[in-house]
Image (tube, helix red, strand yellow):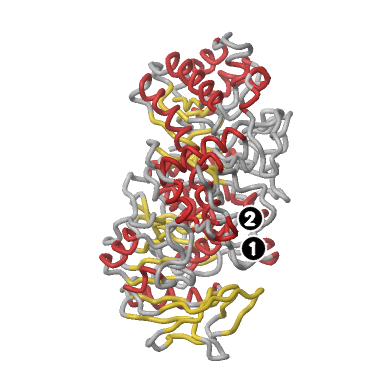
């Protein structure tokens, strides 16, 4: 259940055996290596030097560790860039992205795909039968640094082929996109350009298909490497490391292609970059948003088996501000991942590098080889592992999350305050603050096991998504703007909420967006978005000016305005109680989770938090007790 990210090429060979032994003593079972080392593996075209990698794998194996080997395609070497210039991606302004960092390739470059398959096959043939190499990671962080969407000539040509395969006939594309508007009709697929360099906004359907195409390019790039690895290493597990707060490709689609989907968890860095208010950031400066890691754990768990392959161990180097975690947070984050069902968790990295771009990024060891602050916390996690089983917790709440809908709103936000991913995380947080476990699921997923379903921002409601909601029997809470788009990103037939009218009988006549606060509702307020609707239903909630903001029909509640945290929590609590779910008003910063045969409490607050009455035993805790310290955890048998 514990791994670590390791870069033997950064250190003298005299350290390797010592490192491997210390890893084993710390309870680490595997090391991820190799994902950035192409220039060392192949310093000249066709000239391979694997002696160092053979020795590194052998040294780790001798200490009883397994290896996750990365394909090095996130960092093509300079000689490759110089010999195959169309490898490089183009940014949105049409500029070539140069060599000198990482992720400088275009997913649509046929030449680069050939080179990536070649190096993957060389590695797979050499190490596919090596018993120490039990896992493989393709590439590294697809799309990091805004690299999913390339605006290169290669991407344009591949996009045209993708469109032709999808639509078949140019007339069908013109109709789907509404190209009669602004005289945008095309005579052939070869006339279609990328949507980035238009005078004003390009057709939103054009953008939507480009987003979908770009996501598909990521998945097909991974699939090419995975097929080669499976041929030569049929018993090894294949993964890729996704990221937090990143939605440029469809992780549900990638999850279907891997054995384990891993992700890189950096709660403090992402809090610093977030749109949270300054007061919130100050309160959780050293702990992170209490629901950031949990949301991503449950999102990636919805993609299949999952794990954390990079866990923040200390200050990072890439955020606007880079505070040190509160003591105990690495232990908390690691246990939280395991509580949510992670197959393993691995701090990034083993030793802090004293050079290059990440020299200010902490590791478990300092550059002078002394233990850093997180080292002892991993030892504490190691000591808890024997108490954990393989039993997974069963959530009774589902949150429906859709990449297509997110892209539609990104392309046409309509208001500067509408941020779909933030909205989904706020709905998740409302349920988690009531002590509820949540599964994040794709639209159309079977919902029969859930008692409550949250639908915060499903702009396009497919027939499959509607059928799953109708068949669920659960209490359903729907957000504003849901059902407002068809599959092409256009207004649906019969107006919003489209197919959802079969669940709640109203029609959106007009929508408005407002800056900031919109209106009070006693138990909270609405902001950003409001729908005016035609309906025979009586509103369940109105604001102080008499504007309806919530309707209910049977087991379905639908907001017609975007709720703030207080209003959202009030309505979610009502729906949960109607569903017969046990809710707990948790103290600020405290979160609960059931999994691995245990019940967990995690305190993200700066102050100690006591478990509420009725939660947890009087004594006999696996970890901690009823008073949970700041950055602390309590664990007891479920």
Residue 619 seen anywhere in this rendered image of the structure: no
Give above or below for 69 relative to 484. Answer: above
Q: Residues within 10 Å of mark 2 (few under 14, many from 20)?
A: many
User: Where residue 270 appears, x then y in whole percent?
Assistant: 62, 52
Q: Quadrant of residue 469?
A: bottom left
Residue 131 seen anywhere in this rendered image of the structure: yes
Residue shown at 60% from the left, 67% from the top: 414
Give above or below for 554 relative to 198. Answer: below
- In this rendered view, identify the residue nearer to me: 343 or 620: 343
Q: Quadrant of residue 204?
A: bottom right
State the SS at label 1: loop
The numbered mark at residue 276 is: 1
State the SS at label 2: helix
- In this rendered view, identify the residue nearer to me: 202 or 623: 202
- In this rendered view, identify the residue nearer to me: 164 or 241: 164
Left or right of 574 in this view: 189: right
Residue shown at 42% from the left, 28% from the top: 226
Image label count: 2
The numbered mark at residue 324 is: none
- In this rendered view, identify the residue nearer to me: 219 or 42: 219
Residue shown at 46% from the left, 71% from the top: 479
User: Where residue 304 appears, x then y in whole percent?
Assistant: 37, 45
Give above or below for 532 relative to 409. Answer: below
Give above or below for 365 relative to 488. Answer: above
Asked if disc 2 and disc 1 are in contact, CB closer than 8 Å, the reply is yes
User: Where residue 375 appears, x then y in whole percent?
Assistant: 59, 38
User: Where residue 447 appears, x then y in whole percent?
Assistant: 30, 60
Instruction: Give the CA separation, mark 2 to mark 1.
Output: 7 Å
Q: Quadrant of the N terminus?
A: top left
The numbered mark at residue 271 is: 2
Q: Quadrant of the C terminus?
A: bottom left
């Amino acid at each position: 259940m514990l791994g670590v990210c390791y870069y033997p090429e950064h250190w003298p060979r005299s350290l390797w055996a010592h490192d491997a032994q210390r890893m084993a003593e710390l309870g680490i079972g595997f090391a991820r290596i190799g994902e950035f080392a192409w220039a060392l593996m192949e310093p000249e075209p066709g000239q391979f030097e694997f002696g160092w990698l053979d020795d590194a794998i052998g040294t780790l194996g001798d200490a009883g560790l397994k290896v996750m080997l990365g394909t090095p395609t996130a960092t093509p070497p300079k000689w490759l860039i110089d010999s195959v210039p169309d490898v490089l991606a183009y940014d949105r302004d049409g500029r070539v992205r140069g060599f000198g960092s990482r992720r400088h390739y275009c997913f649509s470059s046929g030449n680069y795909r050939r080179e990536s398959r070649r190096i993957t096959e060389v590695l797979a043939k050499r190490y596919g039968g090596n018993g120490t190499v039990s896992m493989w990671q393709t590439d590294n962080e697809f799309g990091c640094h805004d690299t999913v969407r390339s605006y290169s000539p290669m991407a344009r040509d591949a996009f045209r082929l993708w469109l032709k395969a999808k639509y078949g006939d140019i007339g069908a594309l013109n109709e789907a996109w509404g190209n009669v508007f602004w005289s945008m009709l095309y005579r052939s697929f070869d006339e279609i350009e990328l949507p980035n360099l238009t005078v004003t906004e390009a057709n939103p359907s054009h953008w939507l298909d480009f987003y979908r195409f770009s996501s598909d390019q990521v998945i097909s790039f991974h699939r090419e490497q995975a097929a080669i690895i499976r041929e030569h290493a049929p018993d090894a597990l294949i993964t890729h490391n996704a990221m937090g707060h990143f939605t440029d490709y469809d992780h549900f689609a990638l999850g279907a292609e891997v054995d384990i989907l891993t992700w890189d968890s950096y709660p403090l860095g992402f809090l610093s970059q977030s749109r949270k208010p300054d007061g919130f950031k100050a309160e959780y400066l050293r702990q992170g948003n209490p629901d950031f890691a949990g949301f991503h754990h449950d999102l990636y768990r919805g993609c299949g088996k999952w794990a954390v392959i990079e866990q923040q161990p200390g200050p990072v180097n890439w955020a606007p501000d880079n505070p040190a975690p509160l003591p105990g947070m690495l232990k908390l984050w690691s246990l939280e991942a395991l509580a949510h069902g992670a197959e393993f968790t691995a701090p990034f990295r083993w030793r802090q590098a004293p050079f290059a771009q990440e020299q200010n990024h902490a590791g478990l060891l300092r550059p002078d080889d002394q233990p850093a602050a997180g080292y002892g916390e991993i030892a504490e996690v190691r000591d808890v592992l024997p108490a954990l089983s393989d039993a997974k917790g069963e959530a009774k709440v589902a949150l429906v999350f859709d990449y297509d809908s997110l892209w539609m709103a990104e392309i046409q936000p309509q208001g500067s305050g509408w941020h779909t991913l933030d909205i989904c995380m706020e709905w998740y947080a409302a349920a988690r603050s009531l002590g509820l476990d949540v599964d994040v699921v794709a639209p159309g997923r079977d919902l029969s096991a859930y008692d409550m379903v949250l639908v915060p921002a499903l702009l396009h409601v497919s027939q499959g998504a509607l059928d799953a909601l109708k068949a669920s029997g659960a209490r359903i809470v729907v957000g504003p703007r849901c059902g407002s788009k068809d599959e092409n990103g256009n207004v649906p037939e019969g107006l919003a909420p489209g197919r959802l009218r079969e669940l709640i009988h109203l029609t959106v006549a007009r929508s408005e967006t407002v800056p900031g606060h919109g209106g009070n509702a006693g138990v909270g307020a609405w902001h950003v978005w409001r729908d005016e609707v035609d309906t025979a239903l009586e509103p369940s909630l109105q604001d102080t000016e008499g504007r309806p903001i919530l309707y209910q029909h049977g087991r379905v509640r639908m907001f017609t305005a975007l709720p703030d945290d207080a209003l959202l929590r009030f309505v979610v609590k009502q729906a949960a109680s109607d569903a017969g779910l046990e809710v707990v008003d948790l103290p600020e910063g405290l979160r609960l989770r059931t999994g691995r045969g245990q019940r967990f409490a995690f305190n993200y607050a700066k102050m100690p938090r006591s478990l509420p009455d009725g939660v947890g035993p009087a004594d006999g805790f696996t970890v901690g007790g009823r008073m949970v310290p700041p950055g602390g955890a309590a664990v007891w048998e479920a």
